[in-house]
Image (tube, helix red, strand yellow):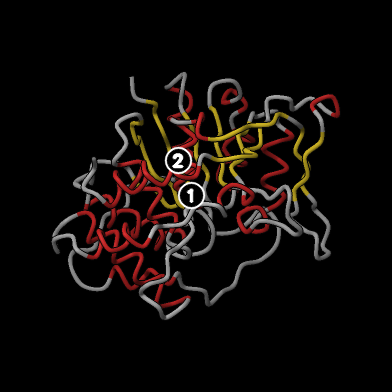
Amino acid sequence: MAIPLLIDTDIGDDVDDALALALALRSPEVELVGVTTVYQCAPLRARLAGRLLAAFGRADVPVLAGTDRPLLGAVRPDWVPNQALVLQGGPQPAVTPGRAVEFIIREGLRRDDLVLLPIGAMTNVALAFALEPRLLGRVRVVAMAGAWDREGGEYNVQCDPEAVAAVLACGAGVDFVGLDVTMQVALRAPDLARLAAAPAASPEAAVLAFVRACQRAWRKDDSFCPTLHDPLAVAAVFRPDLLGWEEGVVRVELGQGPARGATGLLPPAAGPAARTRVARTVEVEAFLELFGNRVCGGGG
């Protein structure tokens, strides 16, 4: 039976969000029940998600814009995601009316086995758990977040460290897929070539449009192969055996200094959050083969 999955995303900056959606759509092990967007320009991000879903023939999947701002702090007022270029021309994708946090709560309460996958800031997730404590024990959280054997913080955590701390403090169990494993997996050049060779009206061509927008904004180099941070988190939902896990208590640095957003892992005995796990190792070739075949090779 497919795992019901709700993806909460900041699609539009790094292209790994779009690649993660594509992997979810091409994975029969999961049922994508909805997409919510988070962090500045959330309505525009929802339209980007809708464009990709439509390209895969899945305009039936609800897409709801979520919270624009972190729990504390400010955002860059003039920031526009680089992949907004994908929306130029053609019909504009629809965004489902409603509020993302309410949608997360509704889906979490009506299912016993929902997996919530935040691959951006955890603001929507933190608000959902704060507003509806009954989600605890019903919703499993798998997150692309954190860095454990590296200095400094990871971007998704840094965008709203208070949200991550709030999710942990409420007692939600979280599987963290962080930089220590995601930095080991990148889109392979032959898979990028397969995307480039796909027919113009195919889902692969739509994925390539997102990749090209990111490549040209960041490197101005169409051969640049992006890191597959968020797709690895998607794979962790239905293939957790691809990763080696360590249980413990995650701590988040909330100060205003340079360490803000840094994450640390303490032994389970150091606190009550023993259900929290951190990915420590990854089966690189097995994951890249899975991703390449499903996203770049026509769904095989």
- Left or right of 111: which side holds 155? right
The residue at 38%/53% (across/down) is: 19
Question: Mark 2 = which residue?
Answer: 234
Q: Secondary structure at mark 2?
A: helix
Q: How many marks?
A: 2
> What residue is shown at x 52% (from left), y 44% (from top)?
118
User: Image quadrant for the N terminus?
Assistant: top left
Q: Amino acid at mark 1?
A: Asp
Q: Is residue 254 above or below residue 248?
A: below
Place residue 103 in its image quadrant: top left
Amino acid found under the numbered disc labelled 2: Val
**In front here: 86 or 67?**
86
Query: Residue at (79%, 26%) from the top-left corner?
Result: 268
Direction from residue 223 to residue 294 in the image, left or right: left
At which x and y percent is residue 285? 45, 44
Mark 2 residue crowding within 10 angstroms, few (<14) / some (14–19) / many (20+):
many
Give the number of the disc on residue 76: none
Do the numbered discs 1 and 2 sit on residues whose CB atoms are within 8 Å? yes
Query: Residue 124 at x, y = what percent?
Result: 55, 45
Q: Residue furthest right?
A: 270
Q: Which mark is residue 230?
A: 1
Q: Quadrant of the C terminus?
A: top left
The percent coordinates of residue 240 (x first, y second) are: 51, 30
Whether 170 is drawn above or below 186: the answer is above
| Mark 1–mark 2 distance (CA, rounded to whole Å) | 6 Å
